[in-house]
Image (cartoon, grey):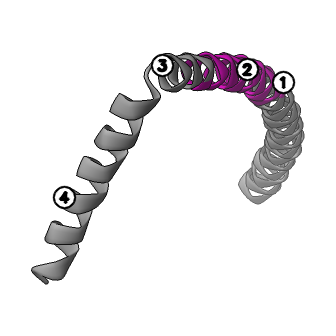
Amino acid sequence: MARVQTNDAVEQTSADLSAQLETLKADVAALTSTLADYGRAQKEQIGATAEETYEAAKKKGAETAQHARKQARDAYAGAEQAVRANPAASVGIAAGVGFLVGLLTARR
């Protein structure tokens, strides 16, 4: 009779263990699914943030380029006015700069 109770206890323990393993498998599957969903959400959020950063940098770059073009046009117009106002001085300055560049390149 003791043997029958032992077999019943072993079968009960085995059944409990199997049930616990099934519950553990289900929990691990649910956790895996949750982590996958979290990863997808993080990927989407990072992608959106990267897109916003790219668009902001693109806009800032375009504004900076436009500002640089305006400054270059203004500088060119100022230089042109200076040359028209003092053509002899402009030719003298250009000759002096050319002479200095020639001296620096001839020493090499």
Q: Earlier in the sequence, mark 2 or mark 3?
A: 2
Query: In whole angstroms, how far apart are the C-alphas of marks 3 and 4?
Result: 22 Å
Q: What residue do we see at 84% from left, 30% from top? A: 34
Q: Is residue 101 left or right of residue 107?
A: right
- State yes or no: residue 28 in magenta: no
What residue is disc 3 on?
82
Task: Please tell me how crowded label 4 is: few (under 14), some (14-19), or many (20+) other residues with Cα within 10 Å.
Answer: few
Q: What residue do we see at 61% from left, 15% from top? A: 74
Nearer to the camera, 71 or 39: 71
* Residue type indicated by callout 3: Ala
Residue 97 position in % (x across, y down): 27, 50
- State yes or no: residue 68 in magenta: yes
* Residue type indicated by callout 1: Ala
Q: Is residue 90 left or right of residue 29?
A: left
Q: Earlier in the sequence, mark 2 or mark 4?
A: 2
What residue is disc 2 on?
66
Q: Which residues are magenta?
A: 48-76
Query: In whole angstroms, how far apart are the C-alphas of marks 1 and 2?
Result: 27 Å
Q: Are marks 2 and 4 in contact (CB under 8 Å)?
A: no
Q: Earlier in the sequence, mark 1 or mark 3?
A: 1
What residue is disc 1 on?
48
Q: Quadrant of the C terminus?
A: bottom left
Task: Please tell me how crowded label 2 is: few (under 14), some (14-19), or many (20+) other residues with Cα within 10 Å.
Answer: few
Nearer to the camera, 4 or 34: 34
* Residue type indicated by callout 2: Gln
What residue is disc 4 on?
100
